[in-house]
Every structure is written in C-alpha cells, then in structure tokens.
Image (cartoon, helix red, strand yellow):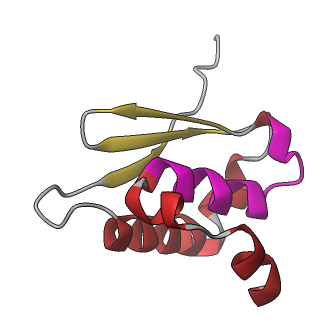
Amino acid sequence: MVDRWRLHYNARMKSDPSELALFLAQSVVDQPALVRVSKRGSTVLLRVGPGEEGRVIGRGGRVIQAIRTLVRLTGDPRERTSVDLDAPRRER
C-alpha cells in the first residue's frame, strides 16, 4: 500500500484536498471509476457507486474519519475543509 501511495502522490494532491480525497476514496472502493468528487464551499463531497457507501464509511466510521483527517492536513490551515459522503436520495 505504501508503494502505491508513493507512486500516485504528487505535489498537486498536496495543494488540492479534493484530489487527495478522490485518490483515497478510489483506493477503498471496488469500483474506483464510479467515484466522483465535487466541492461546495469548504466541503468536499464524495459520491461512490451503488452499495459502496459502507466501504467509504468503514466500521464505526473509521475510514471516512481518516480521509477527513488527511484532507484537513493537506488543505489551507485558515480554511477548515470537511469531507462528506454525498449519497443519492432513495425514492420511497
């Protein structure tokens, strides 16, 4: 895993929290091509394929919390960047 991180990490990710969030989310899910990232203000929104939300959240929310921590560390210290999972709404 560390070698993969070194291979894909570059200076652009360090300055753009959404790129880092995209890379981390794609590393966790089974279908990385379906991961989408959008930015709304200081919030990075992750959208993943159907049924993949649980992989991004992780057991007890550990995975999403780790992603949030890493994204905050790479972002601007004056701007508190947050990461949320943008799940599609289910019709009732």
- Residue 8 is left or right of residue 11, and the answer is right
Provide residue 25's location: percent of width, then percent of height: 66, 56
Q: Is residue 54 magenta?
A: no
- Residue 2 is left or right of residue 15, and the answer is right
Q: Which residues are magenta?
A: 18-33
Q: Nearer the viewer, residue 75 or 58?
A: 75
Residue at 64% x, 11% y: name it.
91
Provide residue 2's location: percent of width, then percent of height: 75, 88
Residue at 60% x, 60% y: name it.
57
Provide residue 84's location: percent of width, then percent of height: 44, 46
Give the vertical position of 4 relative to 27 (above or below).
below
- Residue 63 is left or right of residue 84, and the answer is right
Give the vertical position of 81 relative to 10 (above or below).
above
Q: Residue furthest right?
A: 30
Give the vertical position of 27 relative to 32 (above or below).
below
Q: Nearer the viewer, residue 72 or 7?
A: 7
Quadrant showing the N terminus:
bottom right
Identify the image quadrant of residue 63: bottom right
Residue at 59% x, 67% y: name it.
10
Residue at 44% x, 73% y: name it.
70
Identify the image quadrant of residue 55: bottom right
Quadrant showing the C terminus:
top right
Q: Magenta-highlighted stretch: main secondary structure?
A: helix
Q: Is residue 27 magenta?
A: yes
Q: Residue furthest left?
A: 78
Q: Residue furthest bottom?
A: 2
Count of numbered marks: 0
Provide residue 24's location: percent of width, then percent of height: 64, 62
